[in-house]
Amino acid sequence: MAAQQTYRLFDVALKQRLTLSPSLTRMVFAAPDVANMKTEGPDQRVKLFFPLPGQDAPHVPRGEDWYARYRALPDEARAPMRTYTLRALRPERGEVDIDFVLHGETGPASRWATHARVGDRIGLLAPDAQVAGSREGVEWKPPSSMRRALLVADDSALPAVAGILEDLARWPHPLEVQAFIEVEHEADVLPLAAPDGTQLFWLVRDGAAHGQRLQEAVCARIGPSGVRAAEQALAEIDIDQDILWEQASTDGAGLYAWVAGEAGAVMAIRRHLVKDCGIDRQAISFMGYWRRGKVLD
Ligand SMILES: Cc1cc2nc3c(=O)[nH]c(=O)nc-3n(C[C@H](O)[C@H](O)[C@H](O)COP(=O)(O)OP(=O)(O)OC[C@H]3O[C@@H](n4cnc5c(N)ncnc54)[C@H](O)[C@@H]3O)c2cc1C
């Protein structure tokens, strides 16, 4: 018997748009069927499908082999698909929140978000509450032995980090938490719920390249761990061809880290944390959320 698919497509409509900051807009999507959606963690990833010009709603194949049929469609008939974070879910109200970085008209998702109006429809591929367990699409899985959490994110990963910090605020024992978050403007700095004592470093790009401020701050503030010297093998990854995606499988002497953002910046931070600082690479998730000049779906 084929494994039951944990994700399924939900047809949703935009109910409300909330400007969180100049660069980040929260879209509240709604549909009665959202009562049957679930989220398994604060960085739950979902796929969004956007209508092609002239369509009211995206046409996405259904059924078990939907993905093969979707891929087989000619470019001009295939609804653009992009990956986002499920920021909040209110199944009892049939509502789900996704926070969009507005980075201009260069991609279908950001373009859609810039112009979207209440009532506009998209497709949302998300975990199905009728299917038990799995935690598919969640990388934030800290072990109970975690004593120190390190979070590094640009604005595309800010929705996930905001959720992770909320999660950490409920952690059963005291933690040392450091979070580095890069945003476009001073006005993009948001009030976040976080555990007491969290060291929150907001880094404003202010014209610098994406990820540069993040790299500088992490390199300046996180030094050699003194644990294992930097003997760990670190395969180079061609981030223009392959998606950078490494998931932590342990904690490194109590440290558990989560790094996501522009893939070039994540690669540089990976090198620093693993090679220069000697932090156990198995204790860090490294995720290229997007790549400058490329389209990843
Ligand atoms: C697991 C996961 C979760 C994510 N969660 C979120 C989320 O909650 N909110 C969110 O906004 N993004 C999120 N992203 C990132 C999002 O998928 C990408 O930014 C995506 O490229 C946006 O699609 P697009 O159609 O706007 O641009 P694309 O068509 O993909 O790209 C067009 C151009 O825009 C550039 N570009 C893409 N993203 C950005 C950016 N953020 N800033 C500046 N330039 C960019 C590309 O390099 C390319 O040159 C997530 C990605 C992953 C993998």
Image: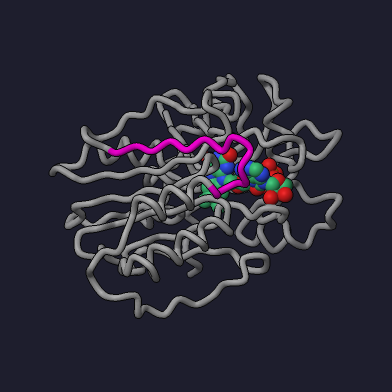
Magenta part of the chain: 199-212
Tell me the quadrant of the picture where the C terminus can be found: bottom right
71 left or right, relative to 210? right
Residue 144 at what x, y percent from top left? 19, 54
Q: Is residue 67 above or below residue 81?
A: below
Q: Position of residue 195 (x, y in %)?
A: 24, 35
> Which residue corresponds to the image point at 31% horizontal and 44% vertical from the top-left?
178
Image x and y of residue 64, in percent: 60, 59
Task: Tell me, yes or no, whether the highlighted magenta stretch contains residue 97.
Answer: no
Give residue 270's quadrant in the image.
Answer: bottom left
Question: Looking at this view, is 55 or 214 the one in front?
Answer: 214
Instruction: Determine which quarter of the picture holds residue 233.
Output: bottom left
Total labels drawn: 0
Q: Quick check: can you spot residue 84?
A: no
Colour mode? Answer: one colour
Question: Vertical placement of 203 versus 188: above or below?
Answer: below
Q: Is residue 211 inside the magenta stretch?
A: yes
Q: Give the residue at x 55% y 49%.
A: 212
